[in-house]
Image: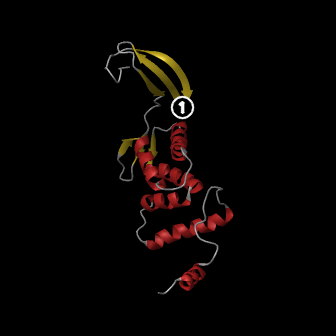
């Protein structure tokens, strides 16, 4: 391990701790005595993603994390929720034992987990993943969520629509509007 400060190629391990799916090591350079931290993860066998156009590319956790973070942007989610979601998906993919996985399988896994985590993030992700062509497709997805929300709402989830009917809400807004 090269020292990040002086680039010397040898260091000693001062402390090791297990973290999530790897090891955290505190190291000290044998040349300049600077201390730094490294994280080690087991690199499982390569996993390839089969894209819609039949191209194959290596699974990229960072790319998946970026897409999910974009969908969850500015949402009131607990710290680390997105990373845990990606960890769960990645672990599930490697546990399957397959060397190639269609991108649709990964997308469906993300959609299922986002639906339980945050409805708005789910709709954002779905709008890109499902390539909604028009507002009707988006409305259908929201309507499906509203129906499923009545049967199961995660505890941390805010309501998609107020308890009033949309017509009542519009009427109340007009009534409360002040005209100068």
Q: Residue at x 48, y 68 (%)?
A: 138
Of residue 170 and residue 67, the one placed in the foreground of this image is 170
In the rendered image, residue 143, in percent from the top left (x then y), is placed at 56, 70
In the rendered image, residue 97, in percent from the top left (x then y), is placed at 52, 36
In the rendered image, residue 15, in percent from the top left (x then y), is placed at 52, 19
Outermost residue to the top = 30
Q: Residue at x 62, y 68 (%)?
A: 147
User: Can you say whether 47 is above or below 133 in the image?
Assistant: above
Secondary structure under badge 1?
A: loop
Mark 1 surroundings within 10 Å by alpha-carbon count, few (fewer than 14), some (14 through 19), many (20 or more): few
Of residue 50 and residue 113, the one placed in the foreground of this image is 113
So how many labels did they put on this image?
A: 1
Of residue 101 and residue 108, the one placed in the foreground of this image is 108
User: Can you say whether 29 is above or below 63 in the image?
Assistant: above
Q: Residue at x 42, y 44 (%)?
A: 49
The quadrant in which residue 2 appears is: top left
The residue indicated by pointer 1 is 21
In the rendered image, residue 82, in percent from the top left (x then y), is placed at 51, 47
User: Can you say whether 17 is above or below 110 in the image?
Assistant: above
Outermost residue to the right = 151
* Left or right: residue 62 compared with residue 159: left
Of residue 55 and residue 24, the one placed in the foreground of this image is 24
The quadrant in which residue 165 appears is: bottom right
């Amino acid at each position: 391990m090269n020292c990040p400060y002086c680039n010397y190629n040898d260091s000693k391990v001062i402390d090791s701790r297990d973290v999530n799916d790897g090891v955290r090591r505190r190291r000290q350079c044998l040349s300049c005595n600077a201390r730094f931290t490294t994280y080690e993860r087991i690199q499982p066998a390569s996993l390839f993603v089969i894209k819609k156009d039949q191209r194959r590319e290596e699974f990229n956790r960072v790319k998946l994390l970026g897409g999910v973070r974009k969908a969850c942007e500015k949402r009131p989610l607990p710290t680390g929720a997105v990373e845990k979601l990606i960890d769960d998906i990645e672990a599930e993919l490697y546990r399957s034992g397959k060397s190639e996985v269609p991108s649709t399988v990964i997308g469906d896994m993300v959609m299922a987990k986002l639906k339980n985590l945050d409805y708005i993030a789910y709709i954002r992700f779905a709008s890109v993943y499902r390539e909604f062509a028009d507002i009707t497709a988006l409305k259908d997805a929201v309507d499906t969520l509203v129906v499923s929300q009545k049967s199961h709402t995660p505890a941390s989830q805010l309501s998609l629509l107020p308890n009033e009917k949309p017509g009542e809400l519009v009427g109340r807004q007009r009534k409360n509007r002040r005209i100068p």
